[in-house]
Image: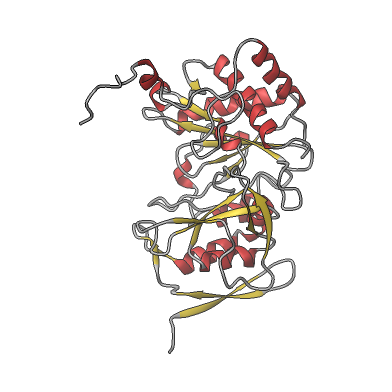
Amino acid sequence: MATNATVLTVDGPHGPREVRISSPDRVLWPELGLTKLDLARYIAAVGGPFVAANGDRPVSLQRFPDGIDGEMFFSKNPPKGAPDHVRSVTVTYPSARAHPQLVIDEPATAVWAVQMNTIVFHPWPSRAGNPDFPDQLRIDLDPQPGTDFGDAVPAAVEMRAILAEVGLTGWLKTSGNRGIHVYAPIEPTHEFLDVRHAVIAAARELERRMPDRVTTSWWKEERGQRVFADFNQANRDRTIAGAYSPRALPHAPVSCPLTWEELEAANPRDFTVLTVPERLRTQGDPWADMHARPGTIDTLLAWWQRDLDAGLGELPFPPDFPKMPGEPPRVQPSRARNPEPENQART
């Protein structure tokens, strides 16, 4: 039986490949009328910078079979029926289970993932050949209710200064929503827990310098109208949307790398599936040289130890993690302060 499908020719390092796109007219972003084929063409158009940012890494796929308003699921194992040029790498999760994850080596692989209804790509901060040792330090600056992108801008600028003080170079991108992601390339010599501690050290320093505007409080009830420096995105198997990845929001935004000179005047809503290809064509990729000069987290780990010695201990882990050494109780502070009497009737 005939099916509605089209074939997209995608250029890459091994020459052009043909990728079949089924249901090309399926609308993914109803507000804009953008289709599955539109998304495939976007990924093909930004393919080089997309692979430079997200390639050679384990990647989780956030898939939307019926568009952004339908059901969603994360695919960690590579989808069935992968072409011969698609590879995977086995990674270990916090539970100690190990599974293969997709690795993107060329634009055609990313377009094939779109064929499998992927909208958001979530790469690990480590390389496929060394998945237990991150080569990126990532800091997610997440505006809380009552704050917005503009509140994250000065926090990102100060974080850049902090990273420079410890010998690291900060690179930034929009989150694709209201936040800002600050990255620093690092030598892959420390495992995930060490990198998490380095992120906490940097986040605590940012909080000290901007206490009324930045928080490291894990519990939402304690954050207030501040920007949350989300240290838990540095954990194993915790990922954020990759550079040039679309986001599942009505205006089809993209998590877009920026130069630091652009940041203050930037509007994250300007960077979308419709606008980013032309931006890359005319302005180039701000992240083109990102990994040319990686640094180390040695000074940040010294800060972590300094804070430990001063009585600042470990911070909470995500709820699906096993209980970790030194971790505080996993209970909301309000519940800890007001425990429910054992004989109180539940309603």
Which residue occupies 66% across, 51% down?
91
Q: Using the image as rendered, state which of residue 298 and residue 286 is in the foreground.
A: 298
**In the figure, is residue 223 to the left or right of 301?**
left
In this rendering, the answer to whether 333 lies above or below 30 is above
Residue extending furthest toward the bottom: 1
How are the colours assigned in the image?
secondary structure
Q: Using the image as rendered, state which of residue 221 and residue 40 is in the foreground.
A: 221
**In the figure, is residue 337 to the left or right of 253?**
left
Residue 224 visible in this rendered orientation of the protein: no
In this rendering, the answer to whether 277 lies above or below 327 is below
Residue extending furthest toward the top: 310
Residue 242 visible in this rendered orientation of the protein: yes
Q: Quadrant of residue 167?
A: top right
In this rendering, the answer to whether 151 lies above or below 103 is above
Q: Position of residue 177 (x, y in %)?
A: 45, 42
**In the figure, is residue 237 to the left or right of 72?**
right
Q: Position of residue 23 (x, y in %)?
A: 43, 74
Which residue occupies 48% across, 33% down?
142
Q: Position of residue 288 (x, y in %)?
A: 71, 48
Which residue occupies 70% across, 41% down?
134
**In the figure, is residue 148 to the left or right of 83?**
left
Q: Which of the image's four quarters has the C terminus?
A: top left
Q: Using the image as rendered, state which of residue 146 and residue 80 is in the foreground.
A: 80
Q: Which of the image's four quarters has the N terminus?
A: bottom left
Q: Position of residue 243 (x, y in %)?
A: 59, 48
Q: How many callouts does the rendering have? A: 0
In this rendering, the answer to whether 13 lies above or below 185 is below
